[in-house]
Amino acid sequence: MPTREQVAGLVDHTLLKPESTRADVAALVAEGRRLGVKAVCVSPNQLPLEDTGELTVATVVGFPSGAVKSQIKAAEAALAVAQGATEIDMVINLGAAKAGDWELVEADIRAVVAASAAAAADLEAPVLVKVIIESATLDDEEIVAACRAAEAAGADFVKTSTGFHPAGGASAHAVELMRRTVGDRLGVKASGGIRTAEAASQMISAGASRLGLSGTAGVLDGLD
């Protein structure tokens, strides 16, 4: 099992409840710094963040449904980058994915990648784009196709889940399949329903290079 420090270094410490206040987010940032996590991930209306120190700032785009026009996702990403986000977690067009319209899925992702890169160029700061495929809603062939679309569009990560879909969150099977599809070319983020040290370790063993956790302290408390 990985150590507490190793797992903390992979964590996006996350607060995406729509009722979250600025005080809640400030507490998240403070806790993230205390726990030594990689990043904090918040809703875009909470940007810009203060007192983040060495923490990476991530936010979400087209969240949680993905059922937003590509132009809106792109604009949302550009504004987020301008307000200090250096990682963008976008939700794919799930309807297009289920219909097998992978050209549309890729174009949607590409719009966000391009907008993020353009905004980052203005600020001279690199930005990573993570693509949420909502893996629990997809069969294996669709998971592979979604990962391929994300890679073709220039994304940096593929991510399992929003954590908001009734179909469920991350599974070790999905993570393993995603990792096998993207190899070492992209990162793989497991997110949604990871609440124990054992579950986190299982996702890492399956190939996850980043974890999205809302109950980070509880997970880390189960590690040495």
Image (cartoon, helix red, strand yellow):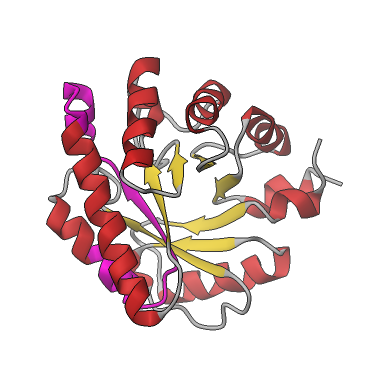
Give percent across and percent down for residue 209: 61, 43
Q: Residue at the far right: name it.
A: 224
- The vertical placement of 24 against 210, above or below, is below
- The vertical placement of 20 against 170, above or below, is below
Q: Quadrant of the N terminus?
A: top right
Is 69 on the left or on the right of 166, as rendered?
left
Give percent across and percent down for residue 54: 63, 75
Is 175 on the left or on the right of 117, as rendered?
right
Image mark count: 0
- In which image quadrant can residue 199 be found? top right
Residue 139 makes an appearance in the image: no
Residue at the location (54% across, 30% down)? 179
Residue at the location (69% across, 48% down)? 218
Verify whether residue 88 appears in magenta: yes
- The vertical placement of 68 against 40, above or below, is above
Q: Which segment is the magenta one? A: 76-102
Give whichever of 178, 13 is nearer the camera.
178
Verify whether residue 213 appears in magenta: no
Residue at the location (41% across, 56% down)? 16
Residue 207 makes an appearance in the image: yes
Is 200 on the left or on the right of 194, as rendered?
right
Give percent across and percent down for residue 31: 64, 68
Give whichever of 101, 215 is nearer the camera.
101
Residue at the location (34% across, 35% down)? 165
Is 89 on the left or on the right of 108, as rendered?
right
- In which image quadrant can residue 29 be found? bottom right
Give whichever of 125, 78 is nearer the camera.
125
Give percent across and percent down for residue 93: 21, 39
